């Protein structure tokens, strides 16, 4: 299943929504990779097993289920999560891209790919509809957390 959707970050017509800078948004997306327990419901722990300037290797702990992944950063542009196939978990990718069609008009495009190119059956379609909705809700929640952190001034510089 390949799936993508867009979440609007700044809403100039709504004075109740605080404007977020591209840098704050970027710091929030990086924080989601480095401290995912702040963002991902059900995640018990995240161990960073390797780090370089533009990449992390992590082990995510969901109870007794362990998921290993790699996160690659293209500064101020995108965060790419790659889960290689492991045990009963198929390979998958999530890319979060910052889009700015005009200055200050920020969006994040969330792109999902489970590398399953087989034709969808009716049953697959039924379950994939639920998955797409769950992804959308999780992504909207990610943006909500980023907004809260920005309002608290916690995204004005990279968090340590």
Image (tube, rainbow, N blue to C red):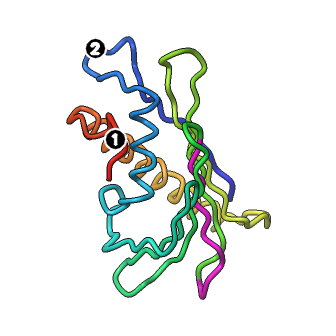
Image quadrant holding the N terminus, namely bottom right
Point out which mark residue 146 bears. Answer: 1
Determine whether label 1 and label 2 are within 8 Å by CB: no
Q: From the viewer's perspective, is residue 2 above or below residue 37? A: above
Judge left or right: residue 121 versus residue 147: right
Q: Quadrant of residue 11?
A: top left
Q: Residue at x 53, y 15 (%)?
A: 103
* Residue at x-position 49% and y-position 53%: 135
Residue 125 position in % (x across, y down): 64, 60
Residue shown at the point (43%, 84%) measured from the top left? 65
Give yes or no for residue 62 being in the magenta stretch.
no
Which of the pair 57/40 is nearer the observer?
57
Q: Secondary structure at mark 2?
A: loop
> Horizontal and vertical percent for residue 33?
45, 57
Give the mark nearer the N terminus: 1 vs 2: 2
Q: Is residue 18 above or below residue 149?
A: above
Decide: few, some or many residues near mark 2? Use Cα within 10 Å; few <14, some 14-19, many ≥20.
Answer: few
Is residue 146 left or right of 73 when viewed as pictured? left
* Residue that sits furthest to the top in the current view: 13
Image location (x, y in percent) of residue 34: 41, 59
Q: Position of residue 20 (x, y in %)?
A: 37, 26
Q: How many marks?
A: 2
Q: Which range of residues does the magenta coloring cover? A: 78-88
Asked if residue 81 is among those painted magenta in the image, a careful observer would answer: yes
Q: Secondary structure at mark 1?
A: helix
Query: Compared to 34, does 147 lie above or below?
Result: above
Cα separation between marks 1 and 2:
18 Å
Q: Which mark is residue 15?
A: 2
């Amino acid at each position: 299943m390949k799936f993508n959707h867009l979440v609007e970050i700044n809403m100039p017509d709504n004075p109740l929504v605080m404007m977020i800078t591209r840098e704050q948004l970027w710091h929030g997306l990086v924080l989601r990779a480095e401290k995912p327990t702040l963002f991902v419901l059900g995640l018990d722990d995240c161990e960073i097993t390797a780090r370089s300037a533009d990449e992390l290797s992590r082990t995510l702990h969901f109870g007794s289920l362990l998921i290993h992944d790699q996160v690659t950063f293209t500064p101020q542009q995108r965060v790419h999560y790659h889960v290689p196939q492991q045990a009963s978990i198929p390979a998958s990718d999530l890319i979060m891209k910052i889009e700015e069609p005009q200055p200050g008009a920020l969006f994040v495009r969330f792109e999902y790919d489970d590398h399953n190119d087989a034709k969808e059956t009716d049953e697959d379609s039924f379950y994939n509809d639920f998955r797409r909705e769950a992804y959308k809700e999780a992504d909207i929640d990610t943006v909500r957390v980023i907004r809260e952190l920005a309002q608290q001034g916690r995204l004005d510089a990279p968090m340590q």
